[in-house]
Image: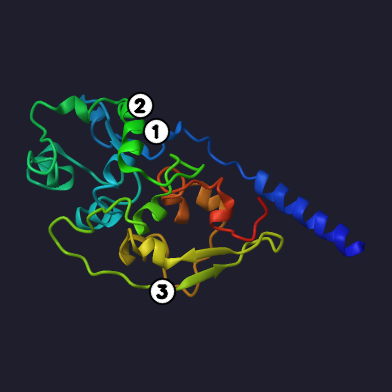
Amino acid sequence: MQLLILLILLISVTDACCSNFNLPALPPREQYGTILIDRTSSANGQQPVTFSHWLHRTKFTCRVCHGELDFQMKRNATEITERANRSGKFCGACHNGKIAFRHNGNCDKCHNGDIGYSDKRFDDFILKNALPMTIAGNGVNWATGFTAGAIKPETYLKKKSQDMNFEKELLLEAELSIIPPAIFPHKAHAAWLDCDNCHPDLFNIKKKGTHFSMTEILNGNYCGVCHISVAFPMDECKRCHPAMRE
């Protein structure tokens, strides 16, 4: 009987700890993964650029933009100029009139400052690609869709990358002993990313163990670089902490 009471108390405390985190409010699912890029636009009298990750990730894996094309992982950390684009860098690597629409005469397709610019295309996008669904983020289970072949994004644009077959899983103990460990699967991440997308800038593996907290993640650091606004959000706890109660 005492053991049962202890177990009930443990579960209650665990749930309470999770609910105490200040999880960011989620946008509508059609806007999850959509960002406004405004490092230089407003300063130069232009509307910020709307970028929808869900529109692009069926075509290319994350490593293409965040590796081959040198976009940093954090929004507005990369200085993207019209001159650079027109010379074939950054967005201009694809938006050249051959792979995707070019800049000339199409300025407002990107420079519109409207986070909901592509909302009306979202449902058609889901139906067209027959993607597996989930309850989190924009409702798409991208990892399952990729492994099942529902989407077949290219892994490189011009420079062929080496296939990553690293499958080691890491057991990440939580700061509080009542919170079950998080499981980090390299395999699922290596399908989309290169090692240098995370190491050493986000996780310094030269240091014997990178120590980070849920608060830091929610502030957009470590896992939070992606799992705040692009990859599945923090409120889907069991995806990382599988032993956690629903």
Q: Is residue 94 visible?
A: yes
Amino acid at pointer 3: Lys
Q: Earlier in the sequence, mark 2 or mark 1?
A: 1
The answer to whether residue 152 is above or below residue 47 is below
Q: Earlier in the sequence, mark 2 or mark 3?
A: 2
Q: Looking at the image, which residue is at 26% across and 53% down?
A: 153
Amino acid at pointer 1: Gln
Q: How far from the left and from the top, in percent, is residue 77?
A: 30, 46
Q: Looking at the image, which residue is at 32% across and 32% down?
A: 124
How crowded pointer 3 is (Cα within 10 Å; few <14, some 14-19, many 20+) is rated as few
Outermost residue to the right: 1
Q: Would residue 119 be found to the left or right of residue 102 on screen? A: right
For the residues labelled 2 and 1, say whether their Cβ atoms are less than 8 Å apart: yes
Q: Secondary structure at mark 3?
A: loop
Viewer-nearest residue: 7 or 46 = 7
Q: Earlier in the sequence, mark 3 or mark 1?
A: 1
The answer to whether residue 221 is above or below residue 128 is below
Q: Which mark is residue 31?
A: 1
Which residue is labeled 2 in the image?
Answer: 116
Q: Secondary structure at mark 2?
A: loop
Q: Looking at the image, which residue is at 23% across and 44% down?
A: 79
Q: Quadrant of the N terminus?
A: bottom right
Q: How far from the left and from the top, in percent, is residue 83?
A: 10, 40
Q: Quadrant of residue 103?
A: top left
Q: Which mark is residue 206?
A: 3
Q: Would residue 99 be found to the left or right of residue 196 on screen? A: left
The answer to whether residue 212 is above or below residue 142 is below
